[in-house]
Image (cartoon, rainbow, N blue to C red):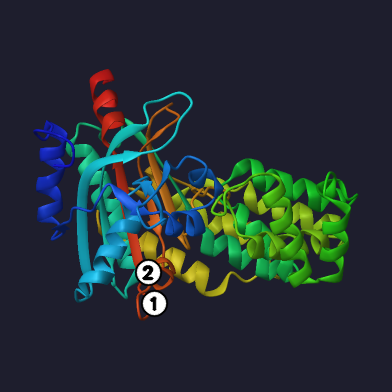
Amino acid sequence: MNARSAPSAIETCLSGFFAGFGAYDVDVPLLQPAEPYLDSTGEALRRRIFLTRGEAGEVLCLRPDFTIPVCLAHIAATNPLPRRYSYIGPIFRQSGTGAPETRQAGLEDLGDADKAAADARVLAQALECLSACGLTTDKIEVVLGDQGLFEAFLEGLGLPGSWQRRLIRTFGDEAALTSALDDLARHDGRSLKGLDPELRRLAMRRDLPALEAAIESLKEEGGLPPHSGRTAAEIAARLVEKVAFAATALSEASLLRLRDFLSVDCSLDQAPQTLAAVCGDDIDLGRALVFFERRAEALREAGVDLAGIRYRAAFGRAIDYYTGLVFEARLRGGDEPLAGGGRYDRLLAYLGATEPVPAVGVSFWLDRIEAAGARQ
């Protein structure tokens, strides 16, 4: 076990379940290349990473999660698919309140082409593991979101592509989503307040080379290291979108319908009817809704009570690599997830896989589970 002399009772329990699920136990180094995290996880995690440099000058970090290094290990080993991996060990994240080191366990389910069945299997097995740790469904609440449905609604609403991309990037970040919706409602340029006039001029002209050069210059003047946050190219592309976004108007009726969709909060068994009412006759969620219903049926077949799971249309997890299902299980009335996961179909190709790999996983926060068990 990483950095521990002996496994705890919960670690032993989960290890047994993971083996029974057919998962291969994998151990990955504590020091990881930082670039995959900086480029693919999003601001919420990126700002909490412990960065350092290797002897050759490469940017490294203390492992802030397991999903990326497990995927990298799979790619390096060229193992056949489908394949399941499990892990247990410490992760490291900067925090103003809690300890920087905590323990995680989890499953990564790679390569199953039946995505609905794989989603349902991971969620059902997560609930089974929590129950084995003493946290039965009467003690926890489970919330589920679906980025695919959100994207389908934005497309059905007829939003311009730049708006769709911006809103999709905010999925899982409530403050950012609220800010984007406020910008949609105002159209008064407030979202550009404080933006350097030269950057704004270049963004309006869509002069990306000049805009990137100006951003690099400002970063150097500010004394920022080259790998701090987003790249100049990424910032430039988003500034161009933001300027175009601020200059376009959205009808009040469309904005109201978007808010109605995002306010959907119901039990999973009631979600299809609720979504149908919000979409009306003119917005077709298409394959995204068909997939959503197939996954719900797979969960029911796995013995999961759909009435005990909440579907929230605005719910996401603040990690950029998620592409579909996202979910969290919390102690009833609690603020922190005991377990959480989701689907990330684009991540392995980004990390170097030769072809896209469907993937879904779940992580367990062991310290929180032990504390919750003690309170129970």
Q: Nearer the viewer, residue 44 or 197?
A: 197
At horizontal 46% and vertical 62% (from top left) the residue drawn is 324
Which mark, by number, is residue 2?
A: none
Please identify the residue farthest to the top as the structure is shown. 375
Amino acid marked by disc 2: Leu
Left or right: 68 in relation to 74: right
Residue wearing tag 2? 348
Asked if residue 300 can be seen in this view, the reply is: no
Quarter of the figure with residue 93: top left
Amino acid marked by disc 1: Pro
Residue wearing tag 1? 356
Q: Work out which quarter of the rendered image holds the C terminus and state it.
A: top left
Image mark count: 2
Asked if residue 98 can be seen in this view, the reply is: yes
Left or right: 325 in relation to 91: right
Q: Given contact means CB atoms under 8 Å apart, are the residues at marks 2 and 1 in contact? A: yes
Residue 321 percent across, percent down from the top left? 47, 59
Q: Nearer the viewer, residue 345 or 231?
A: 231
Q: Work out which quarter of the rendered image holds the N terminus and state it.
A: top left
At horizontal 48% and vertical 51% (from top left) the residue drawn is 319
Height in image: 349 above or below 51? below
Identify the element where label 2 is drawn: helix
